[in-house]
């Protein structure tokens, strides 16, 4: 890798990737909708624009040999057209710009949500099919995006997709802060029995997996056209892990419970009400969220270990210590 573009370079995963690349002495470019002075201070050339603009992308990717496509509309609520514009059309534009500029490698940030069909997944591998009826626009459009990227693996362009699950760690401004906010407000309930296990992925491990994929595409290419689940070596019991984090942050543990059928019904009702009144903020409960909070979803990482040589760099306990120290330093 000589000249690399990171779309969504100002986001949580994107910024971690940029730091890793700069640390390796790679000429690194970043692309996003906003200015990123922190990246500029690292010596990164930043392009401010929209992946929905093909002309902008073609100009930004000129001379690049590798692209990490991290930019996406995340979350579990919002207009379908916005998810489609960014995750589907935007990804198609990235693929086209790679081809137009003869980029050799494209690594796409995907999600395990592409295979989540409303039932527990325990040790599932990459042979699991895409969800036939995704439970949110995010999952539906990320399926289409991943298919587009992996389907583009031909004609001088090698592609791969990384599926990290519940990315966390210092620098996270979304998942963990929102969790802490709800915990402090006493607004959380254990959905279901509370014994469900889930994969989590520490941010440094996620960035490392992306780099390994690009290196594979640059050398043997055995990962070309394939997707990879990424996470910690072992899943965690979701609610126990949340309560351990809360204890370290002096937040009362979550003890109240709600049966899954009730949470699912409430989620459906809230979705209908929010849609009817055109509310843009995310409902406190959705059907997708009820499933995620109540069911197990952890995956085999054997394929990533075998083809990419993936090993976690940071174990869960060390990561939690780093996260708590950062949260206390930033008073999150």
Image: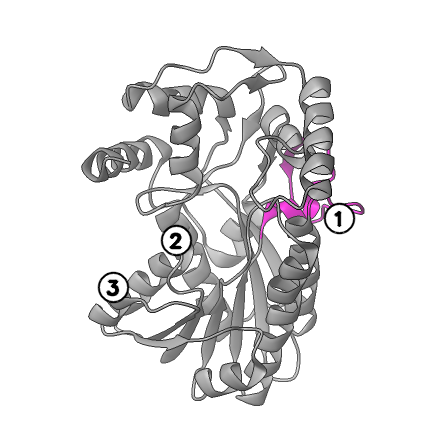
**Which residue is pictured at 53% across the width and 52% down the height?**
304
293 versus 30 height, above or below: above
Image coords of residue 122 (percent x, y): 64, 31
Marks 3 and 2, the one that precedes in the sequence:
2
Marks 1 and 2, the one that precedes in the sequence:
2
Q: How crowded is the residue under tag 3: few (<14 C-alpha within 10 Å), some, or many (20+)?
A: few
Q: What stretch of residues is rendered in magenta?
A: 111-136
User: In the figure, residue 2 lies in which quadrant?
Assistant: bottom left
Q: Main secondary structure of the magenta part?
A: loop
Of residues 135 and 100, which is closer to you in this image? 135
Image coords of residue 67 (percent x, y): 47, 73
185 versus 44 height, above or below: above
User: In the figure, residue 225 lies in which quadrant?
Assistant: bottom right
**Which residue is pictured at 67% across the width and 22% down the height?**
263
User: In the figure, residue 11 lies in which quadrant?
Assistant: bottom left
Q: How is the image coloured?
A: one colour
Q: Residue furthest front?
A: 277
Marks 1 and 3, the one that precedes in the sequence:
3
Could you tell me which secondary element the residue under label 1 belongs to?
loop
Of residues 140 and 268, which is closer to you in this image? 268
Q: Residue furthest right?
A: 132
The Cα–Cα distance between marks 3 and 2, rounded to whole angstroms, is 13 Å
Query: Is residue 130 found inside the magenta-colored segment of the image?
Result: yes
According to the picture, the residue beneath numbered tag 2 turns out to be 12
Could you tell me which secondary element the residue under label 3 belongs to?
helix
Numbered tag placed on residue 38 in the rendering: 3
Q: Do callouts 3 and 2 mark residues in contact (Cβ within 8 Å)?
A: no
Numbered tag placed on residue 129 in the rendering: 1
Of residues 314 and 28, which is closer to you in this image? 28
């Amino acid at each position: 890798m000589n000249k690399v573009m990171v779309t969504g370079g100002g986001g949580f995963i994107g910024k971690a990737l940029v730091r890793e690349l700069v640390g390796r002495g790679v000429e690194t470019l970043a692309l996003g909708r906003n200015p990123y002075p922190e990246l500029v201070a690292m010596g990164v050339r930043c392009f401010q624009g929209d992946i929905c603009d093909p002309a902008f992308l073609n100009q930004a990717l000129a001379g690049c040999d590798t692209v990490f496509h991290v930019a996406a509309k995340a979350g579990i609520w919002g207009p379908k057209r916005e998810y489609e514009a960014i995750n589907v059309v935007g990804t198609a534009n990235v693929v086209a710009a790679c081809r137009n500029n003869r980029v050799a490698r494209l690594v796409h940030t995907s999600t395990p949500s592409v295979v989540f069909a409303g039932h527990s997944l325990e040790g599932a591998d990459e042979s699991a099919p895409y969800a036939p009826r995704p439970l949110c626009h995010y999952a539906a459009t990320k399926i289409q995006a991943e298919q587009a990227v992996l389907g583009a693996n031909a004609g001088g362009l090698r592609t791969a997709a990384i599926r990290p699950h519940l990315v966390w760690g210092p620098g996270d401004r979304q998942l963990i802060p929102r969790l802490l906010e709800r915990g402090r407000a006493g607004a959380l309930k254990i959905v279901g029995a509370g014994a469900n296990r889930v994969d989590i992925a520490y941010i440094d491990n996620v960035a490392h997996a992306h780099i390994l994929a690009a290196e594979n595409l640059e050398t043997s290419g055995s990962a070309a056209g394939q997707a990879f689940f990424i996470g910690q070596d072992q899943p965690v019991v979701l609610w126990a892990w949340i309560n351990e984090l809360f204890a370290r942050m002096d937040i009362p543990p979550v003890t109240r419970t709600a049966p899954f059928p009730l949470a699912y019904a409430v989620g459906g009702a809230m979705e209908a009400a929010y849609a009817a009144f055109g509310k843009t903020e995310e409902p406190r409960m959705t059907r997708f969220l009820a499933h995620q909070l109540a069911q197990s979803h952890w995956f085999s990482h054997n394929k990533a270990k075998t083809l990419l040589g993936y090993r976690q760099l940071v174990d869960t306990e060390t990561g939690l210590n780093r996260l708590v120290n950062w949260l206390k330093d930033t008073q999150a």
